[in-house]
Image (tube, rainbow, N blue to C red):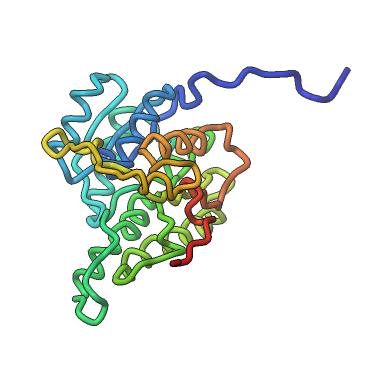
């Protein structure tokens, strides 16, 4: 008898039976990930400061048994603790945590003019990742283990002027990811995704939705020939949260259409 496993079917619903928390899940990339979780057979609790957008998600999804929303301030420990507790009360377990919430804009005040409060606010994604991971870890480690996914950025490794705080926050997420992977393993796997240019205009609350104005040059500069969409991040998120990624931890995954591999000089 061969010791090689037989050919097996790939799971049609890789997150079936799993519960995933997504911070900043009511808009943009976060919503894209939340919808991907639902499409992969999972259940999702989204947390966001934008209550209107969160309620709109639930209404548009129309999946009351599988989706829930709670207002979340990732910079307040009581809010993070309550978010995790609400998920456990609603679904009874937590299998995945996606730390996505934070300041979306990369550009801030020039460093010489930046106040301490702005610096701290722009590092909120790093602070929130700490708080939400801290309170979710016990539940994630139960029931056979789980996964944490941190949403960083290609700006952790390349920059434009006046983006120091954003770059520091995203760079911190990469370091936090591999450190926590060693501390929380083997029960909990920890990975990150670094998106490039993702067009999120159509993925906002209904009153703010707009079709992104993208030029041919915007698309053509990407080696894949287009700007990214939230679904691109959601697809990889589903894989990394699923049991199919059981041998992957402590890693960052760049999803940028090849831009960080393209050598660019001004003619």
- State the residue at coordinates (37%, 48%): 217
Residue projecting furthest to the front: 267
Picture coordinates of residue 158 (x, y %)? 44, 64
Please name whichever residue, 184 or 24, is drawn nearer the observer in this view of the structure: 24
Determine whether 189 is above or below 242 in the image: below
Please name whichever residue, 80 or 190, is drawn nearer the observer in this view of the structure: 190
Picture coordinates of residue 71 (x, y %)? 18, 42
- State the residue at coordinates (46%, 22%): 16
Determine whether 53 is above or below 13 in the image: below
- State the residue at coordinates (11%, 36%): 207
Please name whichever residue, 31 or 125, is drawn nearer the observer in this view of the structure: 31
Residue 98 occupies which quadrant of the picture?
top left
Q: Which quarter shows the N terminus?
A: top right
Residue projecting furthest to the right: 1
Picture coordinates of residue 97 (x, y %)? 40, 42
Picture coordinates of residue 267 (x, y %)? 45, 66
- State the residue at coordinates (21%, 23%): 60
How many callouts does the rendering have?
Answer: 0
Q: Is any atom of residue 265 visible in this view?
A: yes
Q: Is any atom of residue 255 visible in this view?
A: no
């Amino acid at each position: 008898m061969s010791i090689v496993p037989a050919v097996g079917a790939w799971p049609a619903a890789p997150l079936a039976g799993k519960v995933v928390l997504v911070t900043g899940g009511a808009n943009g990339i976060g919503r894209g990930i939340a919808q991907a979780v639902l499409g992969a057979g999972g259940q999702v609790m989204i947390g966001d400061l934008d209550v209107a957008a969160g309620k709109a998600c639930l209404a548009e999804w129309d999946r009351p048994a599988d989706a829930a929303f709670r207002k979340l301030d990732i910079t307040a420990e009581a809010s993070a603790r309550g978010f995790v507790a609400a998920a456990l009360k609603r679904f009874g377990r937590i299998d995945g945590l996606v730390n996505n919430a934070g300041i979306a804009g990369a550009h801030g005040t020039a460093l010489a003019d930046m106040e301490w409060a702005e610096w701290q606010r722009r590092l909120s994604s790093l602070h929130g990742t700490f708080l939400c991971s801290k309170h979710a870890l016990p539940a994630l480690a139960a029931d056979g283990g789980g996964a944490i996914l941190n949403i960083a950025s290609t700006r952790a490794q390349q920059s434009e002027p006046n983006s120091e705080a954003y770059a520091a926050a995203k760079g911190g997420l990469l370091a936090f990811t591999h450190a926590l992977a060693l501390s929380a393993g083997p029960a909990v796997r920890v990975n990150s995704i670094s998106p490039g240019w993702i067009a999120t205009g159509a993925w906002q609350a209904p009153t703010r939705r707009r079709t992104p104005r993208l030029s041919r040059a915007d698309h053509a500069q990407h080696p894949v020939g287009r700007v990214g969409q939230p679904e691109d991040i959601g697809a990889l998120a589903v894989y990394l949260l699923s049991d199919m990624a059981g041998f992957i931890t402590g890693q960052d995954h760049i999803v940028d259409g090849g831009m960080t591999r393209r050598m660019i000089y001004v003619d």
